[in-house]
Image (spheres, grey):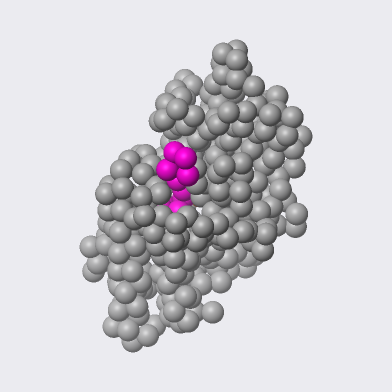
């Protein structure tokens, strides 16, 4: 069944993604937003998988039949995670004279967007292994599946990660590229743009602005459409942040604080995430942002308390166990992530210890 397009405002259409209960069996699919502004169209987070892409394709065809003509088409990946940075081929189907695909420079590796599932999972495991053993992080019954990898890792670590990434990548669709080469958004090229007494750093796309909002990933960006007072945030508000070793609690808080400033000043009244519900109204968005910021701060203070009370032990798995048993917040985090990926909770602990200078 196709994803039904949902009109949010004139010029803003949402193609809803899908959460996965089990990343071993099916991928997460991010929301895709389709924007039209005169002769310019933007696809924000082109997502992954055929189903959602085909719905976007037929929506584009319908819009063209209804007389829409675009001079400029832009695809923006909110970040290079494999549930967002895919379906780049859509840029070939717009009929626009000028077409761009933008990904933040931190989402590139050796000149290519880091969105290939096997490489993505391999990189994630290798990063994680610097702080704790990911094969031993899972709870029952997933631990039973992981023991062979843990055993293999003892003698043949390269083979273990190779096998794990190949198997882990099975449900994830590979990148579907088109003719247009993705262009990096270079941080040093970002300009300072003033809104009343607020200054933001970003890249202009017509009348819209791409903002750097790192935290969930170093390459996370949001798209701000001032005229609609709309902010497309990708995973900047992802529940369970930080979920990867490349995440940062500090950057998450800083990015959310900047979004809060814009919202507080009345510049944002429509908050459009890559997963979950669209939030409308200044009060509702402020409440959401304040909740996220306070939860991140609480996460950090609970991790550091556990570290102190366990005699400054630098064992991520042990500290995670203590937190999941004793803290209502971490119990909830486990519940939210289980059985999807218990690994994420360990990453919260490891990232926090790294940022506080406990781990290298
Ligand atoms: Fe993500
Ligand atoms: Fe995502």
Q: In the depicted view, which residue is nearer to us: 298 or 201?
A: 201
Quadrant position of residue 17? top left
Residue located farthest toward the front when viewing the structure as drawn = 196
Residue located farthest toward the top when viewing the structure as drawn = 65
User: Which stretch appears magenta?
Assistant: 226-239
User: Can residue 65 be seen here?
Assistant: yes
Instruction: Residue at 55% x, 39% y: name it.
Output: 44
- The stretch drawn in magenta includes residue 238: yes
- The stretch drawn in magenta includes residue 259: no
Q: In the depicted view, which residue is nearer to us: 179 or 231?
A: 231
User: Can residue 243 be seen here?
Assistant: no
Instruction: Residue at 67% x, 63% y: name it.
Output: 188
Q: Position of residue 168 (x, y in %)?
A: 55, 47
Instruction: Residue at 36% x, 55% y: name it.
Output: 265
Q: In the depicted view, which residue is nearer to us: 108 or 244?
A: 108
Q: Is residue 25 above or below residue 220?
A: above
Q: Quadrant for the C terminus, please.
A: bottom right
Q: Position of residue 326 (x, y in %)?
A: 23, 69
């Amino acid at each position: 069944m196709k994803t039904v397009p949902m009109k949010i405002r004139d010029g803003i259409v949402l193609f809803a993604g899908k959460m996965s209960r089990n990343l071993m069996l099916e991928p997460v699919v991010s929301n895709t937003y389709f924007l039209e502004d005169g002769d310019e169209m933007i696809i924000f987070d082109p997502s992954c998988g055929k189903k959602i892409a085909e719905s976007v394709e037929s929506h584009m065809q319908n819009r063209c039949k209804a007389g829409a003509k675009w001079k400029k088409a832009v695809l923006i990946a909110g970040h290079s995670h494999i549930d967002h940075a895919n379906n780049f081929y859509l840029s070939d189907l717009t009929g626009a004279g000028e077409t761009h695909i933008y990904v933040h420079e931190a989402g590139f590796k050796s000149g290519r967007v880091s969105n290939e599932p096997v490489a993505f999972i391999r990189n994630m495991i290798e990063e994680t292994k610097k702080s704790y053993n990911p094969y031993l992080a899972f709870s029952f019954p997933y631990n039973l599946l992981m023991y062979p990898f843990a055993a293999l890792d003892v003698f043949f670590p390269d083979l273990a990660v190779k096998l794990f990434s190949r198997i882990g990548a099975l449900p994830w669709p590979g990148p579907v590229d088109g003719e247009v080469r993705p262009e990096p958004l270079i941080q040093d090229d970002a300009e300072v743009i003033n809104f009343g007494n607020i200054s933001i750093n970003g890249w202009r796309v017509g009348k819209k602005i791409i903002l750097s909002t790192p935290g969930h990933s170093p390459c996370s960006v949001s798209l701000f459409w001032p005229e609609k007072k709309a902010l497309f945030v990708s995973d900047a508000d992802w529940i369970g942040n930080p979920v990867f070793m490349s995440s940062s609690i500090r950057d998450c808080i800083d990015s959310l604080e900047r979004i809060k400033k814009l919202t507080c000043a009345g510049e944002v009244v429509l908050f459009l995430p890559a997963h979950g519900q669209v939030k409308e109204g200044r009060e509702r968005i402020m409440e959401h942002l304040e909740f996220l910021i306070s939860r991140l701060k609480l996460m950090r203070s609970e991790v550091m308390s556990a570290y102190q009370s366990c005699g400054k032990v630098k064992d991520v798995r042990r500290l995670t166990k203590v937190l999941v048993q004793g803290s209502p917040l971490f119990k909830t985090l486990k519940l939210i992530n289980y059985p999807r990926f218990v690994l994420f909770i360990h990453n919260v602990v490891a990232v926090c210890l790294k940022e506080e200078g406990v781990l290298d």
